[in-house]
Image: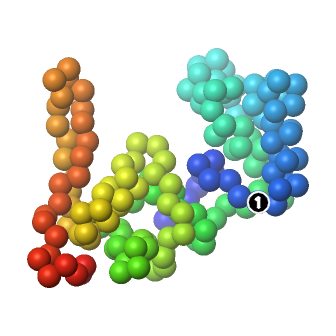
Amino acid sequence: EQYRFLNSGCIAGYAGALHVATGRMTANKFDNEYVLRSPLARTWAERKFLLVGKDDQTAWHTYAVRHPGEIALDYGAEVFLNIIGFDLPDFDLMEDTGVWAKAFKKEVCFAHGNGASNVARYLLDAKRFAVQPWTCAEEVRVGPAGERMYGLVCPPPPSHGSRH
């Protein structure tokens, strides 16, 4: 499935283009068409939900809508992969410490654990535990104050020290 939304967890580009874009977004102390007056939020409820003026996501999305020729999204994970929507079985750890994204049939350069996803952190944990991520599972416990605590449970690494 192709990504449908821009994510500002990683922004890359030519310095001059980034300077122009961020200059437009910060103009008039953020009181502009990209941030505080974004047309993506039409009501106060929408403004609150989209965190208008408090989060850069809406500003970058608005910018992309207004300037489609200046923004490119990395749909093929050529440089950057947003991990939300993926799970541990979607990845393999490579011998050279890289991460292989099965959906794209390639090594991931940068992975962003955006939103409510713990997968990026769990990939690091699996690497630290010297096991493949698909052998692990997320564990959810209830803490002493009733809070939910998330963690990764993995089998012990192979005794011969090699990865699968």
- The image shows residue 58, relative to residue 154, as above or below, that is above
Q: Is residue 137 above or below residue 79?
A: above
Count the numbered circles shown: 1
Q: Quadrant of residue 120?
A: bottom left
Is residue 25 positioned above or below 84 on the image?
A: above
Mark 1 Cα within 10 Å, few/some/many (few <14, many 20+)?
A: few
Percent x, y of residue 9: 59, 49
Q: Is residue 139 left or right of residue 116?
A: left
Residue lying at 13% horizontally and 66% vertically, measured from the top left: 156
- Which part of the image, by quadrant, shows the C terminus? bottom left
Q: Is residue 112 left or right of residue 162?
A: right
Residue 153 as seen in the image, left or right of residue 75: left
Q: Residue at x 22, y 81 (%)?
A: 162
The x, y position of residue 8, in whole percent, is: 63, 47
Give the left or right position of residue 59, taking residue 118 as reference: right
Residue that carries the numbered disc 1 in the rendered image:
13
Quick check: can you spot residue 157? yes
- In the foreground, 90 or 93: 93
SS at mark 1? loop
Q: Nearer the viewer, residue 150 or 98?
A: 98
Residue at image point 35% right, 61% down: 123
Tag 1: amino acid: Gly
Residue 102 in sight: no
Q: List x then y, in percent, for residue 83.
A: 45, 57
Viewer-closest of 148 and 160: 160
Residue drawn where x is 19% and y is 78% of the image? 161
